């Protein structure tokens, strides 16, 4: 498979479905930025700023385990959820097909 579907829950609760390539080594953050979503990505994908914070509404159990660095960054946020991840730490892959994410930003 070369493309997967990523569903983004918008602020008005509507869902936008995007086709994402899995063969380019993109992270979820890079992909969403490339689709004109408002993600600052201040640290450039180093898990240092949390401006790419997403809540995984559906498919959280499909994702690779969270790293200590990623968790430490998320743990500083006021709006962390049980399914929070940093978009920069999620490389687009076949296992992410049909996940639903909501962009949370840096919580400020």
Image (cartoon, helix red, strand yellow):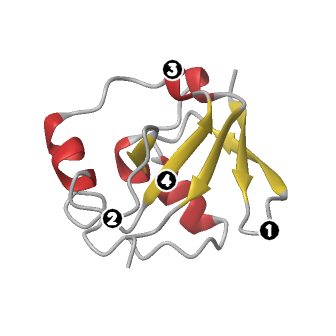
52 sits to left or right of 11: left
Marked residue nearer the N-terminal end (1 or 4): 1
Q: CA distance from mark 1 to mark 3?
A: 25 Å
Q: Which residue is mark 2?
A: 78
Return the x and y of residue 67 as percentages of the image width and height: 21, 33
Q: Quadrant of the C terminus?
A: bottom left
Marked residue nearer the N-terminal end (2 or 1): 1
Mark number displayed over residue 12: 1
Comparing labels 4 and 2, the label whose residue is closer to the camera: 2
Q: CA distance from mark 2 to mark 3?
A: 23 Å
Q: Residue at x 52, y 48 (%)?
A: 55
Determine the secondary structure under disc 2: loop
Q: Quadrant of the N terminus?
A: top right
Mark number displayed over residue 54: 4
Residue 3, compared with residue 39, is above or below; it is: above
Return the x and y of residue 85 as percentages of the image width and height: 40, 45
Q: Which residue is mark 3?
A: 61
Mark number displayed over residue 92: none
Q: CA distance from mark 1 to mark 4?
A: 16 Å
Comparing labels 1 and 3, the label whose residue is closer to the camera: 1
Q: Residue at x 73, y 63 (%)?
A: 10
Return the x and y of residue 32 as percentages of the image width and height: 59, 60
Determine the secondary structure under disc 1: loop
Marked residue nearer the N-terminal end (2 or 3): 3
């Amino acid at each position: 498979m070369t493309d997967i579907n990523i569903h983004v829950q918008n602020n008005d609760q509507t869902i936008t479905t995007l086709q994402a390539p899995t063969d380019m080594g993109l992270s979820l953050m890079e992909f969403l930025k490339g689709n004109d979503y408002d993600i600052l990505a201040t640290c450039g994908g180093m898990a240092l700023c949390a401006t790419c914070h997403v809540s995984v509404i559906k498919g959280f159990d499909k994702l690779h385990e969270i790293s200590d660095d990623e968790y430490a960054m998320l743990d500083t946020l006021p709006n962390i959820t049980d399914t929070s991840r940093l978009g920069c730490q999620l490389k687009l892959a076949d296992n992410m097909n049909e996940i639903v994410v909501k962009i949370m930003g840096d919580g400020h």
